[in-house]
Image (cartoon, grey):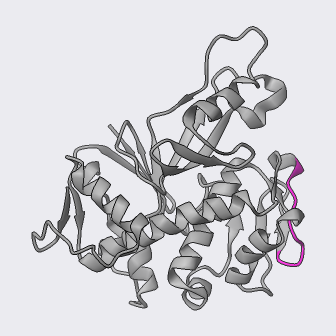
Amino acid sequence: MIVIADGQTSVDISGWEPPERDIYEEKHRDPTTYQYDSEGALRFELRLRTAIVQAAKDMQHSAASFSSFKKSRCNAAYWTRTESGGFQMRQDVRSAAAIRDIFSNGRAYAFECATAIIIVLYKAVLETIGDQKFNRLFTNLYLYSWEVDSDLRLITIAEKMPTYSGDILYFKNPDVDPEWMEWQGENVVKLGSDSYFGHGIGITNAAGIIAKLNKHRKPGSTESAYLIDQVTYPNYVYLYEAASSRVPVSQTALAWLPSEARGRIVVRIGGRTAIYA
């Protein structure tokens, strides 16, 4: 159920775009309570979730290649490749232009699925808040893995939870062949009920992702890959307040946790938040 701060439990969604309406209705039907400070904060999340789905689809058609961190590559006009295989934005370019280049000049890029997730999230935020605000908020982008990103204030809930379009999930391959460690798992964007985007695999269902991972197990292995009970998403409230030009961002947003985190162990590591049962 969706609840606005003043106790409002219903929102007029007749003028919303279909993807936003679909996510709203799905969350509103769920018995979990999702609380929002305002209708604006709710709408921002739904717009950003919709943009995440679209950014994942755009990456699928970008011609960017899949590779291990060791063999990653990028356009040197916008990024400097680090020794670890990540991409550090050049100081003489704008963040919005650097992100857009990955999608318009994809053949110049190759990266791992974890890097792809971060790129998708930044592209979605860019399309949601626009170039000017994006350039103001993100001045020193580093693309590597969602596990080291701090700008998006990512939240990870490490237990079985309802998931929605735009969420980041992970398929684990516990018996991966050591010769193919880049296939030890697949970070994916949930696009719909049973539709996912994983860089290097493409857009398919859960069975398709598992089948691909299972092809890279140790010889004779009988332990299948599987979707783990974990969900990751950006701190929507933080991004909503940061993009609204209210400076500094309120401590409420910086400290914000989803209502489903109540009664659970919360650990903050840099800009990331992990929530455990």
The part of the image, by quadrant, that contains residue 225 is top right
**Residue 20 x %, y %:** 39, 67
Furthest toward the top, the residue is 220
Q: Is residue 214 above or below residue 258?
A: above
Furthest toward the left, the residue is 7
Q: Residue at x 47, y 70 (%)?
A: 48
Q: Which residues are magenta?
A: 71-78
Quadrant in which the C terminus is drawn: top left
The part of the image, by quadrant, that contains residue 186 is top right
**Residue 175 x %, y %:** 68, 20
**Residue 264 x %, y %:** 28, 43
Q: Residue at x 82, y 77 (%)?
A: 78
Q: Residue at x 50, y 63 (%)?
A: 271
Q: Is residue 91 above or below residue 178?
A: below
Left or right: where 205 falls relative to 70: left
Quadrant in which the N terminus is drawn: bottom left
Query: Is residue 34 one of those drawn in magenta?
Result: no
* Count of numbered circles on the image: 0
Left or right: where 242 falls relative to 120: left
Q: Please tell me which residue lies in front, 41 or 58.
A: 58
**Residue 132 x %, y %:** 59, 91
Q: Please tell me which residue lies in front, 18 or 209.
A: 18
Q: Which secondary structure dominates the residues rendered in magenta?
A: loop
Q: Is residue 210 above or below residue 35?
A: above
Q: Residue at x 69, y 81 (%)?
A: 95
